[in-house]
Amino acid sequence: ALPIIYAITPTYARLVQKAELVRISQTFLHVKNFHWIVVEDSPVKTQLVSELLAQSGLRFTHLHTETPKEHKRKESDPNWLKPRGVEQRNLALQWLRENRELSEEGVVYFADDDNTYSLRLFDEVGAVRFGGKEWGSAEIRSTKRVSVWPVGLVGGLRFERPLVEKGRVVGFYTAWKPNRPFPMDMAGFAIALQLLLANREARFDLLAERGYLESSLLQSLVSIEELEPRADNCTKVLVWHTRSEKPKMKQEELLQKQGLGSDPSIEV
Ligand code: UDP
Ligand code: MN
């Protein structure tokens, strides 16, 4: 059977949340054998996310856990100050460990809600659909332990990527803190479900130093030599670390002061 791809998406309420979730959910609709684990950073499951998931047409699991106050980023903090989505991703790992069996074939991918995902990443390639050679016929889904590939628009570079020689990862192209054990973005790797089920203690460290979150999980699961290069030996960018601009609400605020703000019953 085709292994299931479990995509874990932490998400939190903000003006662009629905737009982000609609965009990536409609990408995921094209992926076969896909299960979306959405974890809200919230004390409750919100109506917005509940309805969006129910109407998405995707197989999904909806969880929630609020980031502890002392770890939460304030509006005024720079975006890199605190790690984001950590407890949410860990809760999803816990859910998998409690609800899935070692005998099941699956692959786990951490899919933030604001990134941009090519279908080629998930193996829905086919020479027919996209034309050209079929280099992408087994990307994420064929992961045996941990697979890796480039991420675009990240780390102050056009892309970061693992460096591959003779089919093996021998280093990383990255500019920022290159001495990290795994100098990779969250979007640049996938993990076999069985590996996560067999290593029940492996989790993200909420207290990890900036940039070391990915390493905190991967260190207990694999070594560099074991990494499985994908995306044509890590020479293709199939995922982009895009970030949405915070929408300006100047007119909305002005109108609100006059009691003429937009209809709050209309969901955005
Ligand atoms: N996130 C969250 N709670 C927060 C901030 C972010 O759950 O307080 C989620 C967010 O929706 C995204 C992931 O964590 O799916 C990573 O956050 P973000 O994209 O802001 O991080 P960056 O891309 O800047 O590293
Ligand atoms: Mn992001």
Image (cartoon, helix red, strand yellow):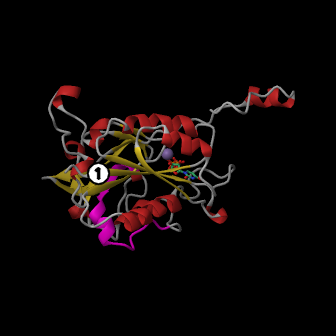
Q: Say whether residue 28 is visible.
A: yes
The residue pinned by badge 1 equals 4
Residue 79 point in image, percent of width and height? 58, 50
Q: Would you say the beta carbon of the disc 1 residue lies within 8 angstroms of ligand 1?
A: no
Magenta region includes residue 171: no
Within-10-Å neighbours for mark 1: few <14, some 14–19, many 20+: some
Q: Compared to 17, does 110 lie above or below?
A: below
Viewed as shown, does residue 160 lie left or right of 92? left
Q: Residue at x 74, y 27 (%)?
A: 262
Q: Quadrant of residue 135?
A: top left
Residue 208 point in image, percent of width and height? 49, 66
Residue 84 point in image, percent of width and height? 54, 55
Q: Say whether residue 131 is visible.
A: no
Q: Residue at x 78, y 31 (%)?
A: 253
Q: Front-most of 1 and 83?
A: 1
**What's drawn in magenta, residue-wise?**
187-205
Q: Quadrant of residue 107?
A: bottom left
Q: Front-most of 112 and 261?
A: 261
Q: Amino acid at mark 1?
A: Ile
User: Tag 1, which secondary structure?
Assistant: strand
Q: Compared to 60, does 136 lie above or below?
A: above
